[in-house]
Amino acid sequence: MKDKKVLVVGSGGRCHAIVDALSRSPQVAEIFCAPGNAGIAGKATCVPVAVTDIEGLVSFAKEKGIDLTVVGPEASLVGGIADRFTQEGLTIFGPDRSAARIESSKEFAKQLMMRHSIPTGAYKVFDRFEEARDYVLANPLPAVIKYDGLAAGKGVVVAQSYDEAEQALRDMLLGECFGKGRVIVEEFLAGPEFSFMCAVSGDKVYPLAIAQDHKRAFDGDKGPNTGGMGAYSPVPFVTDEIRERALNEIIIPTAKALVAEGAPFKGLLYGGLILTEDGPKVIEFNARFGDPETEVVLPRLKSDIYELFENVALSTGKELDLEWSDETVLGIVLAAEGYPGSYTKGIVIEGAGSDCDSDNSFVYQMGTSLNDGKLVSAGGRVLMAIGVGNDVATARRAAEERIGRIKADGMFHRTDIGKAAIK
Ligand code: AMP
Ligand code: GLY
């Protein structure tokens, strides 16, 4: 019966994709999104409650009789949204604070992996600058230096020189820009990266399709690290055998490890993995949907996403056979010039609406708002053009054609998304 009311917490392209997938569910009657964005407003009722206003979200969910809440951003999880919703008897898809430490504390994640023999790079933790510097100088380059805590994607430096490594350690341990100083210095792992998102409820794992993100700002993997400039799914180099290994050697053991340590996970466990010569290893875990991976994975899902969310949120342990389209979905992010550094907001955008879509292309909005009825940019990553096709090259052409119908000054995008998968 189509009678369910869902609240999605968040505002980016990831939430636009979640709202879109929920709108295809035969059970979902009404979708609310807090706070949402101009694109999401086409499929959900946007409500002006901030993602960190946990009490405001609890009140809203109670008032509206929401059946299920789905959480997008880590800030809500770290703020304890799942703990509070559960206390109030509200059904929520998202881990509590204790399980979300797998993302919010890199040290917790690393220790958990070590204790449970989950494959990842060797590491050492430092809170004193001199010790960290001496250690890095005594070891080969590149040096991987990670800030321990949430740092909005800016907390990882892969230093190719000792000067760069020293500067990163100064910023993280002596500087003011990150707050409490503690870093992890990690073994450099070489290989292609891929993203494996799984819905997890205790030790029950529901794997989603694999995707690959492109973290650097510019073509050829040049420029600074960003939140992600484009993605595609499926990923040809991740064969069924590699996927099974990743599932059995990494994701399932991690879900079981969290249960064993009294912090069972309920929500979306994101494995940022790398295929090394010794097999898949963990670069990082996130406790939420990836952005921009979600935008290319969920359009391939043929099954009812509400059923998945509900079974995880209620910990039913039910078997679900998720069905996926064989087509490739590829998305290209349009970002404001200057991103991931400082950038202007308020760029006027035309041609992002569904009236400009085609059968094999559309747009998810990432950072947009309406100003006097006009669509304007409101974030660094603004839009994601999505193309669908039989292979990566066809999907990319469709996404590029969709970009061709967007008019906006002062935005840039990569032209080589999925290149590694195009022969
Ligand atoms: P993270 O925020 O941990 O995902 O790191 C951002 C990016 O830094 C990753 O996507 C990798 O490209 C790179 N990176 C992080 N850790 C390592 C590592 N141990 N070896 C090689 N590259 C890494
Ligand atoms: N695309 C990587 C992330 O969501 O963190």
Image (cartoon, rainbow, N blue to C red):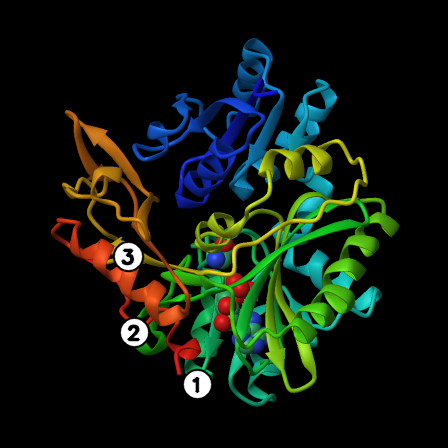
Front-lying residue, 44 or 160: 44
- In the rendered structure, which amino acid carries the disc numbered 3? Tyr
* Residue positioned 28% across, 65% down in the render: 397
- In the rendered structure, which amino acid carries the disc numbered 1? Ser
The residue tagged 3 is: 339
The single residue placed furthest to the top in the displayed view is 63
Give how far across and how far down residue 385 sits, in percent.
30, 53
Q: CA distance from mark 3 to mark 2?
A: 14 Å
The residue tagged 1 is: 161
Q: CA distance from mark 2 to mark 1?
A: 22 Å
The residue tagged 2 is: 219
Dividing the picture into quadrants, the one containing residue 391 is: bottom left
Q: CA distance from mark 1 to mark 3?
A: 24 Å
Compared with residue 30, is residue 315 higher up or lower down, i.e. above or below? Answer: below
Give how far across and how far down residue 173 sits, in percent.
53, 63
Residue 4 relative to residue 383: left or right? right
Q: Secondary structure at mark 2?
A: helix
